[in-house]
Image (cartoon, rainbow, N blue to C red):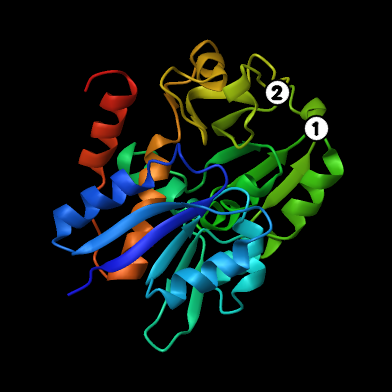
Amino acid sequence: MKKDSYAVMGNPIGHSKSPQIHRQFAEQTGQDISYETLLVELDGFAAAVDWFQNEGGKGLNITVPFKQQAWELVKDRSERAELAGAVNTIVISGDGSRYADTTDGVGMVRDIVENHGLELKGKCILVLGAGGAVRGVLQPLLEQRPQFVIVANRTVSKAVALASQFNDFGDVFGSGFDVLPGQQFDLVINGTSASLEGEVPPLPDDLIYEGGSCYDMMYSAEPTAFQVWARGHGAVQSLDGLGMLVEQAAESFFLWRGVRPETGVVIEQLRSEMQGGK
């Protein structure tokens, strides 16, 4: 009997940790599945999804640069995907119908709250950046009922426009970096990729409340530039996004298979491998 097949589509895709993560999830939960990477031509996304479905594929993860195309392609979407304007998970049903969701935001929140034990309710939160990564996490973040969320971006109008899309979920405001001096936050989340290039936005030295934490949605083998900045500016915890990667994968796995895997052991193994501890 043929295994149920799943894959991640992107370009580039060779760096993806998703096959390893989902193989571990399958072993844990006794699910007999296959999971592979699929390099898709930049102008061939819709055709690739059709091909995968015609071959009997049951579900897809979608990564850069196809998340918005996936949103446009699949019309039956979750509320959080609708608002995010991007999709990272497609479920293909036996009747041929497709359902799209985004699991990035719930994955980040689960990592922050459950894996790292941070309470978000009633907290003052700053999010850096106003691109797709931030748009994808604002609804789940606001559903934790923080006191407020400020989205800060170099292009102020982009931050203001993004924040206005999520007003229904809580107090969220857009701003530039120039208004941050004099303000303090319980949690600062970096949603820009700049820290992987060694850059940090222009942030005041006293940005973090005593006892506050920082979270970088990016991750690498070494601490990111934002994590280094956070450690030097009073953050009690300076966290990266490796747990978010595993948690968003677990949510996708749950959507496909109806069973929720254990993430802690997978995060630990990936961390160990990244740091050369194979």
Q: Which residue is mark 2?
A: 201
From the top left corner, tell me how far across and down residue 14 is, in percent. Answer: 46, 39
Image quadrant in which you'd find residue 265: top left
Kindly identify the amino acid type of the residue bearing the numbered disc 2: Pro
C-beta proximity under 8 Å, tags 2 and 1: yes
Image quadrant in which you'd find residue 96: bottom left
**Does residue 194 appear to the left or right of 55 in the view shown?**
right
- How crowded pointer 1 is (Cα within 10 Å; few <14, some 14-19, many 20+) is rated as some
Q: Which residue is mark 1?
A: 154
Q: Quadrant of the N terminus?
A: bottom left
Residue 139 vs residue 256, the one in the foreground: 256
From the top left corner, tell me how far across and down residue 162 is, in percent. Answer: 74, 52
Residue at position x 41%, y 21% in the image: 221
Residue 58, relative to residue 23: is it above or below?
below
Residue 50 vs residue 29, the one in the foreground: 50
Q: What element does badge 1 sit on?
A: loop
Q: What element does badge 2 sit on?
A: loop
Residue 129 vs residue 54, the one in the foreground: 54
Residue at position x 69%, y 20% in the image: 203
**Does residue 108 appear to the left or right of 175 in the view shown?**
left
Q: Furthest residue to the bottom?
A: 95
Kindly identify the amino acid type of the residue bearing the numbered disc 1: Arg
